Image: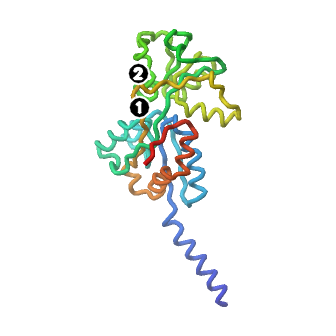
Amino acid sequence: MTKGLGRCLLVGLLTIFIRPVFADHAYIATATNFRPVVNILVQQFEKSTAHTLTVVSASSRKLYSQIINGAPYHLLFSADVETPQRLVAEERANGLSLQVYAIGQLVLWANGASVDEHTLAARQYNKLAIANPKLAPYGLAATQTLAALSLADDTTRLVMGENVGQAAALVATGNAHVGLIGLSLLRDRERKTGNTMQQAEFWIVPSALHQPIEQAMVLTNQGTQNVAAQDFHRYVSKPSSLDVIRSYGYIVRDG
């Protein structure tokens, strides 16, 4: 056997035996509003590593319920801080990994129509779509906004989706005239359609009208043993990843 052939065989054997040590698979659970961003980050991550990731999305509270009932999620991207904190307090997640990754922005959206700061206050709509406030932090922010504008009693005009994605779908299909949803979903719609959203079609709700939509991630107990989940947790904080997050309308704190 020549030295060159022997060297090739050695490299091949090392590849076979070493690669599985560094390659892992993880289940990523994300709140619906952040799913488009996670999809992009996962694609980029998988191109640069040997890891593979599977993404599941739902409302934050529903993901919490699935985790405590045994769902094999390794990393959770919640739309709030309270849900990850609760998992940590219940010793189902690693508190050292809990980190705010973005602050969401709530918008009032009308598909193809014009809205502004007077649309809600003047009740210039027939049906208003929101996410379920008991399940989705964006739904809670929506109800806080309505309460701040003295509209909490106007329940007959509300239509509700389980999560913010369903609320957006109600507006997109014409089942609601307007909706209080995440700005990220509009940015995702722009990317998919190739059409820039007209400024008049949405109004960014002032943050003073609701509690900050701080969104946090955390490694579950299973995730602390998963290399792919740990690496992706770190990957999300890279400058290039933060640029992607910002491009979807999120506010990212420096440092």
**Residue 128 picture location, percent across and down:** 53, 16
Cα distance between the residues tagged 2 and 1: 11 Å
Q: Amino acid under label 1?
A: Pro
In the rendered image, which quarter is residue 115 located in? Answer: top right
Q: Tell me if 138 is positioned left or right of 108 in this view.
A: left
Quarter of the image with the N terminus in it: bottom right
User: Can the viewer see residue 106 in this picture?
Assistant: yes
Q: What residue did someone put label 2 on?
A: 144
Residue drawn at point x = 41 percent, y = 41 percent: 216
Q: Is residue 129 above or below residue 238?
A: above
Q: Which amino acid type is shown beneath numbered disc 2?
A: Gln
Dot 1, crowdedness within 10 Å: few (<14), some or many (≥20)? some
- Relative to 237, is 172 on the left or the right? right
What numbered label is drawn on residue 133? none
Q: Residue drawn at (58%, 59%), measured in percent from left and top?
A: 48
* Residue that label 1 marks: 212
| Residue 154 image point, x, y percent | 45, 10
